[in-house]
Image (tube, grey):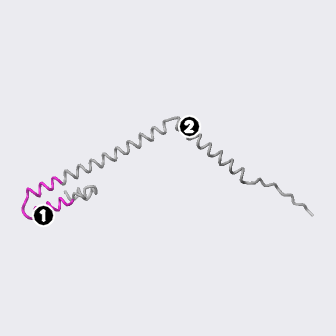
Amino acid sequence: MVKDLFEENPECMELFGLIVEAEKSLEQNDVEEARRLTQLAMENCQDMIDYAKLEKEEDITAVSALVGQIIVNPFFVMGFVLAVLALAMLAYWFMSKRVPKLEPKRIEAG
């Protein structure tokens, strides 16, 4: 059960040494020490899992709030549209200056 908890949660692998120590204590018939180490490892692992979940939730909340502010802000939307239009106009201006206009050539029959 305890090993499953550690295998399913990679953030707890650094605490796996406590489980190994608990197994050694159990082999030496020191049941209390084995129980203490196992309990310590499980509590710390659960804390790490909770902290990792909290970090993910905070990251998602922060990104959602930022995206919501950007999309809802009308000044940002207008500025973005104006910037795209300005870039399109610049590209058109540069392209019209660099590409010479071709005159159709007349082919005379004869």
C-alpha separation, residue under disc 1 versus residue under disc 2: 67 Å
Q: In the rendering, at what x and y percent does residue 92 appear? A: 68, 48
Residue 10 sits above or below residue 92 on the image? below
Circle nearer the N terminus (1, 2): 1
Residue at left 11%, top 58%?
A: 34
The magenta stretch is 16-40
Q: Which amino acid type corresponds to the residue marked 1 in the rendered image?
A: Lys
Nearer to me, 85 or 108: 85
Q: Which residue is mark 2?
A: 78
Residue at left 16%, top 53%?
A: 40
Residue at left 25%, top 59%?
A: 7
Circle 1 Cα neighbour tier, 10 Å, few/some/many (<14 / 14–19 / ≥20): some
Q: Which residue is mark 1?
A: 24
Q: Which amino acid type corresponds to the residue marked 2 in the rendered image?
A: Met
- Horizontal arrangement in the rendering, residue 47 relative to residue 99 (left or right): left
**Could you tell me which secondary element the residue under label 2 belongs to?**
helix
Q: Is residue 18 magenta?
A: yes
Q: In the rendering, at what x and y percent does residue 62 appear? A: 39, 42
**Could you tell me which secondary element the residue under label 1 belongs to?**
helix
Q: In the rendering, at what x and y percent does residue 85 appear? A: 62, 42
